[in-house]
Every structure is written in C-alpha cells, then in structure tokens.
Image: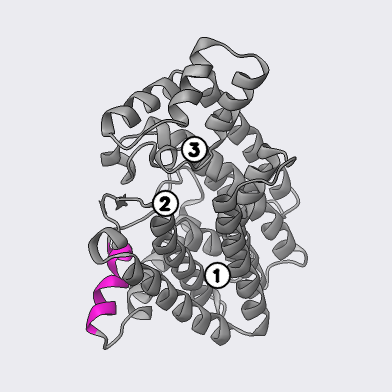
Amino acid sequence: MPSTLPGVPDIDEDLATRIVERLGTIEDRLRASVSTSDDMVRWTGRHLMDAGGKRVRPMLVLLAASLGDIDADGVQDAAVLVELTHLASLYHDDVMDSAPTRRGTDSAHALWGNNVAILTGDFLFARASGLSARIGTDAVREHSETFERLCLGQLHETVGPKPGDDPFAHYISVLSDKTASLLALAGSLGASLSGAPQGSADVMRRYGEKVGVAFQLADDVLDLESDAATSGKTPGIDLREGVPTMPTLLVRRRAQDHPDSHSLDIVERLDGDLSSSAALDELVDLLREDPALEETRGLASRTAEEAMEILSELPAGAARDALKAFTATLVGRSR
C-alpha cells in the first residue's frame, strides 16, 4: 500500500507510520530548541522554520535509524541537530546570495538586514552545537567537521576556482561541502545512534555524500524550471549573483569549445547586467530551452543511481527499500 511519508510514495506502511509520527515530534522539538527569552531572536530564529520546508535531513536521520532502533537515545536529537544546522546555513547563504525570498516568504536579511540574519544563523548553530554535546563526543566531532565543510564550501563558491582548476571538479566539490556533507552527517548519525548493523554508519555516510550531490544537481534543474510560487525562491537568482550552476558551466564549455550563436548569446547575458527582472527572465527562458538542462538532469540521475548502488551494501529489508524510494524522490522532484 502507498505510504503516508511526505513526498516518498510506496514504502512499507508500518515504517512510514513510525517515521511520520516521529517527524511530528521532531517538528515540536525544533521549535522548542530555539525558544529564548530574547524578544528579537524569538522571531528571527523561527522565521525560516515557520516558513516550512521538506525536512529532508531529519527524515534521512530517521530512515537511517530504522536500520536499527529508531527510538534509541540521541536519534531525535540528531534529527533536530541536522535541521538546525541546515536552517542556520540558509540564513548565511541568503546574505551571501542577496536572495530576496526563501520558502515563499521574505528572506531574513530582507526583513531585518544582513547583520541580524548572520547573527540569527550563528544563534542556530550555537543551539545545534548544544545538541551535539548532549549526544556525545563523536557527534561533536562529526558536527564540527561538517560545520567546517559548510564554511569551506561557501568560501570556495564565493572565491571560485583557481587558475588552471577544472571548473566542473571545483563545482562538484562545492556541492559536496555545501549540501552533501550535511546529508552524510544525517545518515551517519542516524545509523550509528540506532545501533544499526556494523558498517551501516559508513555506508550511510558515503550514501549521503553521493545523494547530496545528486540532490543539488536536481536543484539546479528545478531552479530554472520552477516558479517562485512553487519553489519559494526566485528562479535564476544564482544567475544574477554570478553563482555557477551545472547548466551554466555546460553552456560556457560549449561556447568555448564549439561556439554557436545560442551558446554565445547565453554567455553574453550571463556576463551582462541581470539587475532587471526582464533581463533575468529572458536568460532563464533561454536556459530552459538549452540542452544543458537535460544534460544536468541526466547527471543528477546517474549520480542518484550511484547512491543507490551504495545502498545495496545494506541488509535487504524495508529500511533499504525506503532509502531507495527516498533517493528517487529527492532527484525526481518536479516543478
């Protein structure tokens, strides 16, 4: 029977029910985790949380934990930890990208300014660190390593590749640090804390690294195909800020190696003035028609298949089946 797990169809019904019940508890705990007597942070800290979200990372913690005891000590703390860390990074990312909206609402920096947004992100990181300390020293180490990678990923995206670097390898490394590292943490913590079979935590860490890259490549496609009402984010906002995406890298390579009028037109627009909505919309329309979009979709699909191959190392059962369905859902999102 189809499951009731949000966004992940056709998995074991009993497992889906258990995860949905715990996701509800985790949602309550997320809000409790940012409670404070400070009048300002009480609102800013809950701003993106209240705007919703897919809760992909807590769901992955629970799916990984279902390889063992999903109710083991620390599992729900880990689920809250990874989501708080993700939310904190969004406050910072939106400042870096000058994003006007997030999840269908005004971004924090658009409402309160850059300083408040950055400090709110720091506040959430601090609360997440408190949770890692409660879980144990291994969680503190893994969380700190992930936090470091999140920072390095954003830094490397901002600075760009060095002369002579492969821009594609550089971009994948940015995706690995900015997105995949936190999914790897979610999978690793969920498996290790639940007492899953030996080796499962390592499998889930490697899986998270791979599926995180696939997830972000799919997001590159979704960013161009969706509209603001669907995604909660202005289509093509990364284009305006000059942030590379896989489709733009593919177009630039084609324009350099096998130039044609269409590719050259896109590159000229990418390097031009995109401050007006009309200019940005025209560029988005051109990229939607470009073969690079399908190339990126294909790369996301192949990377997801590699992630599923890693899952084949896990014991057969409902948990592994659910993780495969989760993978397909992450990469098969549509507008």
User: Where residue 73 sits in the image (x, y, percent)?
Assistant: 56, 81
> Which of pointers 2 and 1 lies earlier in the amino acid sequence?
1
**Image position of 21 (left or right of 43):** right
Question: Which span is picked out in magenta?
Answer: 39-50
Q: Please say whether residue 30 is visible from this viewpoint.
A: yes
Distance between mark 3 and mark 1 Cα atoms: 33 Å
Q: Amino acid at mark 2?
A: Asp
**Image position of 224 (left or right of 299):** left
Instruction: Write down the residue under mark 3.
Output: 220
**Image position of 216 (left or right of 30):** right
Rendered image coloring scheme: one colour
Q: Amino acid at mark 3?
A: Asp
Residue depicted at x 41% and y 46%: 7
Instruction: Write down the residue under mark 2.
Output: 97
Residue 47 forms part of the magenta stretch? yes
User: What secondary structure is the magenta-colored segment mainly?
Assistant: helix
User: Where residue 278 sits in the image (x, y, percent)?
Assistant: 27, 28
Q: Is residue 138 above or below residue 311?
A: below
Residue depicted at x 29% and y 50%: 100
Residue 186: quadrant of the picture: bottom right
Q: Nearer the viewer, residue 183 or 70?
A: 183
Q: Residues within 10 Å of mark 1 (few under 14, many from 20)?
A: many
Q: Is residue 204 above or below residue 189?
A: above
